[in-house]
Structures are given as structure tokens and as C-alpha cells.
């Protein structure tokens, strides 16, 4: 009698599988689940100091997604354009510091995806209500385009639209659920992407909302 069966089982599922999405992009299913309570508390504390708000695009449209930030700089949009700003224009105070649980999750996910040493200095927090959407765009306001972007989905599920390097490239649809982490690096870093209108639902921890954390090396 040996314990080979148990050894094999222990080896069969050591860590969640990496699901490739494209060149340099991959999904780590449920990677953030172990830290979901600490993440929820940290988001609530950030929103107390820097409330969620609907930014205005340079074209004058109010975004359906509500946003806030933490870290050294925050992403903001207004009639003058997009920028990373060390000061929250609404409170005139620096953005809340990035909580250790945020930085550790982002670093661990990036390392797992093959990008060791990821040290984000900015985290944009997006809050979606049913019907909120994000139209196709590129993230190119960051100075270090060699660093990946790490995205953490919490609450209601959503459909990512993941296109190519040209706006006209037809996007793939990728469902992301509570706790899923997506890492976008290498050739995928400048891909066009967006989020389809959020379907209504009721999440046990987050209610009728989806929250998305995007970690960036902006400076
Ligand atoms: C693909 N947020 O804040 S994160 C954004 O779910 C943003 O809130 C979406 O796009 C959200 O800018 C999607 C996923 C994401 C982020 C950056 C990318 C996908 C990306 C950069 C390149 C390719
Ligand atoms: Fe984006």
C-alpha cells in the first residue's frame, strides 16, 4: 500500500490554472478570492477619503462608471483632458495611500503571470452599476508601457471586450467573475479594450455592483 494516489492528487491542482487570453495577457481565475474581505474593507476606507464620482470626458460626456483612486497618482479626466494627478481634484488632497493588501495582490498576480517585481504606483477603482459600460479605448497615459496592467474583478460578473492594436479589430468577449484577476502585458498592453453594459444581479458581498481595480505603473 502506497500513498501515490494522494501524491498525485496533491500535484494535480496545486494552484489555479492560467488561462491564456492573448499574447502576454492571461486570466487567473478566482486569484483574489482569498483576500476578498480585506479588499472590500480597503475599498470602503478609500471611498470615505476619496468618494466615487462620475468623471467628465474631454468631449463633455459623463462617464457611466464611477471612479476613485489610491496610490501616488490617480487617473482623472475633465474637459482639459486625461492625466495622472497626485492630488484628487474633488478633495484637493493627495489620493489615499495604496493599502498593502492591494500592492501584494497585484505583485503576486503579476509574478504568477510571468512579470516578477511589479510595483504599481497607481490603482484606479471603477464601480459599475447595472447598465454601466466602458467603451473601447487604449490605456496609454502611463510612462512605463513595459510594465503590465493588473485588473481585479469583484462583485457582479462582466464581459470584457478585448480587441487588437487597431480600434477596428473585432474584440473577443471574455467573461470575468468575482475574484478573477487579469494580467495584460507584453504585446497586449496597448490592445483596445472595454466593458459591455453590466447585467443586473445581486452579489452576496457587493450587491448590485461590480468593482474593478486596475493596477498601473504610471510614473
Ligand atoms: C487590456 N477598466 O480602467 S480592466 C480601465 O473592468 C479599464 O473596469 C476595465 O479598462 C474595467 O482603463 C477593464 C481590464 C484592462 C485594463 C487594461 C488593459 C484590460 C486591458 C490594457 C490593455 C489591454
Ligand atoms: Fe482601460
Image (cartoon, helix red, strand yellow):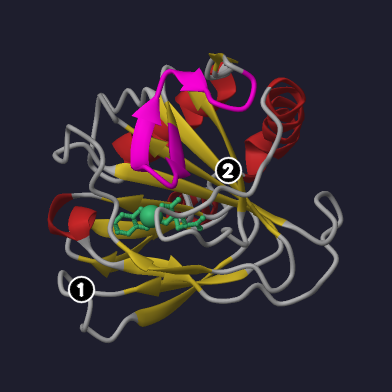
Q: Residue at x 15, y 51 (%)?
A: 186
- What is the span of residues highlighted in magenta in the rendered image? 75-91
Residue to which mark 2 is pinned: 32
Q: Residue at x 66, y 42 (%)?
A: 53
Image spot of residue 209 (x, y percent): 75, 58
Q: Residue 164: which disc? A: 1
Question: Marks 1 and 2: which is nearer the front?
Answer: 1
Q: Secondary structure at mark 1?
A: loop
Point 27% across, 86% down: residue: 170
Disc 2 crowd, CA 10 A, few/some/many (<14, 14-19, 20+):
many
157 shown above or below 3:
below
Percent from the top left, x then y, of residue 147?
A: 21, 36
Q: Residues within 10 Å of mark 1 (few under 14, many from 20)?
A: some
Is 33 situated above or below 217?
below
- Is residue 88 magenta-colored? yes
Percent coordinates x, y for residue 195 in the rendering: 49, 69
Amino acid at each position: 500500500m502506497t500513498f501515490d494516489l494522494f501524491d498525485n492528487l496533491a500535484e494535480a491542482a496545486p494552484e489555479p490554472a492560467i488561462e491564456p487570453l492573448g499574447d502576454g495577457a492571461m486570466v487567473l481565475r478566482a486569484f483574489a478570492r482569498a483576500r476578498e474581505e480585506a479588499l472590500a474593507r480597503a475599498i470602503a476606507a478609500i471611498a470615505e477619503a476619496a468618494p466615487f464620482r462620475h468623471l467628465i470626458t474631454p468631449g463633455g460626456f459623463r462617464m457611466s462608471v464611477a471612479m476613485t483612486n489610491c496610490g501616488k497618482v490617480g487617473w482623472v479626466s475633465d474637459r482639459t483632458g486625461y492625466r495622472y494627478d497626485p492630488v484628487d481634484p474633488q478633495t484637493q488632497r493627495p489620493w489615499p495611500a495604496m493599502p498593502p493588501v492591494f500592492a501584494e495582490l497585484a505583485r503576486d498576480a503579476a509574478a504568477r503571470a510571468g512579470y516578477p517585481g511589479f510595483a504599481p504606483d497607481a490603482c484606479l477603482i471603477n464601480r459599475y452599476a447595472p447598465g454601466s459600460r466602458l467603451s473601447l479605448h487604449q490605456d496609454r497615459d502611463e510612462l512605463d508601457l513595459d510594465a503590465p496592467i493588473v485588473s481585479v474583478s469583484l462583485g457582479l460578473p462582466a464581459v470584457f471586450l478585448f480587441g487588437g492594436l487597431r480600434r477596428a479589430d473585432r474584440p473577443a468577449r471574455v467573461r470575468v467573475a468575482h475574484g478573477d484577476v487579469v494580467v495584460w502585458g507584453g504585446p497586449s498592453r496597448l490592445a483596445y479594450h472595454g466593458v459591455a453594459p453590466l447585467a443586473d444581479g445581486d452579489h452576496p458581498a457587493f450587491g448590485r455592483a461590480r468593482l474593478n481595480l486596475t493596477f498601473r505603473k504610471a510614473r
